[in-house]
Amino acid sequence: MTTALPRRTLLAALAATPLVLAGCTGSPSDAEELLAAHDLPGGTAREVIDALEALPLDERPAELLASVGTDVLTLSDATGQEATLDLPAEELYVSVAPFVTGTHECFFHSLTTCLGELAEEELDVRVEDASGTVLVDASRTTAPNGFLGLWLPRSEELTLRLAGAAGEATTTLRTDAEAPTCLTTMQLGA
């Protein structure tokens, strides 16, 4: 014999489910608290990513991990504190580390630990979509960590061309839910 739960109990449980699930990923205030603990300003995922990427290497908090996924920025530290911030629904962040002689494997970009070879290097950057529409055509400088951050439209197949003093490289990249946020395969002058 089974006992049926009263309808009121079931409705209360269903109403609480989103609160429980939301608590698992952390809230923006959790992220702000975690960032403040490391003397960093809060903000949206885009603001936090842009701020961390621009920091000089010696000012990046070594005890903070900040990993860029396709949908969220995940923040964690040695105390076990963790929080996430949602990335913009219409944009994906792709961080590119062009290189001449040395690189590393990477799939999800770490804003606090990934290092590229060409720090603060000026590059001509061109991004086109499949129809040939130019999305980016500008001179940009890689960050102190050697990465060039690009906010790109989601669900696209794009052509990225980089040119600098060491040469140029072109690659195709995707911005779908399975795409990497860290690109370390563009060898200049190869």
Image (cartoon, helix red, strand yellow):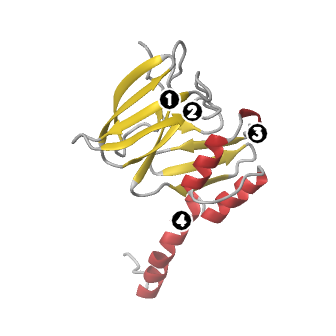
CB atoms of marks 2 and 4 within 8 Å: no
Q: Nearer the viewer, mark 4 or mark 1?
A: 1
How far is mark 1 from mark 2, CA to CA? 8 Å
- Pointer 2 residue: 142
Which of disc 4 and disc 2 is earlier in sequence?
Answer: 4
Q: Nearer the viewer, mark 4 or mark 3?
A: 3
- The kind of residue on which mark 3 rests is Glu
Query: Where is 95 relative to 104, above or below?
Result: below
Which of disc 3 and disc 4 is earlier in sequence?
Answer: 4
Judge left or right: residue 17 versus residue 126: right
Res. 187 visible in picture: no
Query: Residue 59, labelled with which disc?
Result: 3
The picture places residue 3, in percent across and down from the top left corner, at 41, 79
- Pointer 1 residue: 123
How far is mark 1 from mark 3, CA to CA? 24 Å
How far is mark 4 from mark 3, CA to CA? 32 Å
Residue at 50% over, 51% down: 72
Which of disc 2 and disc 3 is earlier in sequence?
Answer: 3
Q: Nearer the viewer, mark 3 or mark 2?
A: 2
- The kind of residue on which mark 2 rests is Thr
